[in-house]
Image (cartoon, helix red, strand yellow):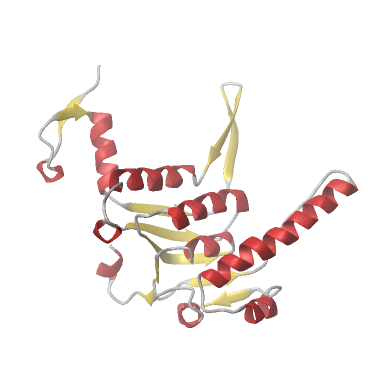
Amino acid sequence: MSTMEPLPAKLGVNVECSLEEFLRTRELEDRRLYLNGEIESLDFESKCIYVSVSMTGKLVEQIFDFNRADKGLPINEREPIRLYINSPGGEITEGFSLLSAIETSKTPIYTINVGEWCSMAFLIGIAGHKRFAMPYTTFLMHEGSSFAGGSAGKMQDRAKFNERFKHEVIKAHVLKHSDMNGVDYDALERVELYMLPEDALARGFIDEIVTDIDDIL
């Protein structure tokens, strides 16, 4: 039997619901998401069953839920989602799943650097509809790392795809979300470009350096 709890008055609902429904409603109301640590899928065995857990899957699910709840509302009337990021980067597949959800979200998503945006986390962070950085944060843009195994043919195929992805997807993404042009990007492509907030602001990777914490709460 489900535990029944009345919803708090601030939610404006006068019916009873299960505890699970109440928690879900609270989750939809508190539009704050957190991405901390390395971006990766976690694989483990549980009771002889092999399980793979997506680190970004829950965040993508919540972004979808927020958009579903806002469906029909004008964009300027939607409460923004705030995504706080402190990550050294990680897996491209995991990262681009979240990045795609951010870019296609009609509900505005604010990304906030509270520690570091490095590598894949940098690509995610600059996708925000509005982008903030705390004063003592760092940024890293680089070409990333990739590995290929198997036969020589398979490795060549993978290398060709990686080269295409690097230019058609990653380069296009960086140019779309910054003040850089193609010449600037090509000159820095193989560089480990570390930046302080002032550098990221100057290149158009963020919109604002936080001076008042109320702006990001």
Q: Is residue 89 above or below residue 140?
A: above
Pick the quarter of the image with the C terminus: bottom left
132 relative to 151 in the view: left or right: left
- Residue 156: x %, y % from top left: 84, 53
- Residue 166: x %, y % from top left: 68, 63
Residue plotted at (25% across, 42% down): 26
Residue plotted at (71% across, 73% down): 190
Asked whether residue 192 is in view, the answer is yes
Query: Viewer-proximal residue, 148 or 161?
Result: 161
28 relative to 119 in the view: left or right: left
Asked whether residue 91 is in view, the answer is no
130 relative to 124 in the view: left or right: left
Residue plotted at (12% across, 42% down): 12
Q: Is residue 6 above or below residue 120?
A: above
Q: Is residue 153 above or below residue 140?
A: above
- Residue 154: x %, y % from top left: 84, 46
178 relative to 28 in the view: left or right: right
Query: Viewer-proximal residue, 160 or 7?
Result: 160
Q: Residue furthest right?
A: 152
Pick the quarter of the image with the N terminus: top left
Count of labels in the image? 0
- Residue 107: x %, y % from top left: 34, 55
Residue plotted at (12% across, 30% down): 15
